[in-house]
Image: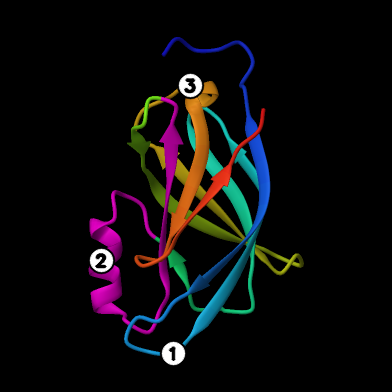
Amino acid sequence: LPELEAIETKESDAVVSFDTTLEFENGIVLELCDIKVNESECAFLVRTDSEDYIFVGGDGIQAQLARTAQPDVPTFVMYANMADGSMVYGAAGMDYELGEDVDRWTLQWATPMDPKSIVSLTFSDGTTEIEVPLTN
């Protein structure tokens, strides 16, 4: 994509609830806020009562490996749903927001993409998928 003069951003706020029963009984609710998507990444804040959870980048294979290695840690993936029906994944990273009691997650796309072509984001724990629509 050609570099844009002004970065376009899509946004959404959502509360996402997962039943993360992966060999154990445990429920987790992720409150997602400040979701922003642009041509290079998706960033969002997570509030949750659970301290043990992770987002893993990629197409789900890394998440399967993480779930096998640490079955007691809920592992999530997020991908973008494109207008043409394809899905786009990114590499995940997290920073804790001091004093805010939230985690800031960033998933960087492998290549730049037009945010206008992203219609929604899907969050998954490997069992449940929740789609979050985006607005301009």
Q: Residue at x 52, y 81 (%)?
A: 27
Residue 132 horizontal/vertical position (percent) = 56, 47
Q: Residue at x 35, y 37 (%)?
A: 87
- Binning the other alpha carbons within 10 Å of mark 2 as few (below 14), some (14 to 19) or many (20 upward) gives some
Whichever of callouts 1 and 2 sits on the residue coming sooner in the sequence is 1
Question: Regarding mark 3 in the picture, which secondary structure is present there?
Answer: loop
Whichever of callouts 3 and 1 sits on the residue coming sooner in the sequence is 1
Residue 91 horizontal/vertical position (percent) = 38, 47
Select label 1 or label 2 by which is in front: 1
Give the CA separation, mark 2 to mark 3: 29 Å
Q: Which residues are magenta?
A: 56-83
Please check the rendered image and state whether residue 82 is part of the magenta-colored stretch, yes or no.
yes
Circle 3: residue type: Asp
Q: In this rendering, does residue 33 appear at all?
A: no
Give the CA separation, mark 1 to mark 2: 18 Å
Circle 1: residue type: Glu
Residue 32 horizontal/vertical position (percent) = 64, 57
Residue 29 horizontal/vertical position (percent) = 59, 72
* Residue 64: assigned label: 2
Question: Regarding mark 1 in the picture, which secondary structure is present there?
Answer: loop
Q: Is residue 73 above or below residue 63?
A: below
Q: Residue at x 51, y 48 (%)?
A: 106
* Residue 25: assigned label: 1
Please state which of residues 83 and 48 is positioned toward the viewer in this rendering: 83
Question: Regarding mark 2 in the picture, which secondary structure is present there?
Answer: helix
> Do residues under tags 1 and 2 come within 8 Å of each other at their CB atoms?
no
Q: Is residue 98 above or below residue 38?
A: below
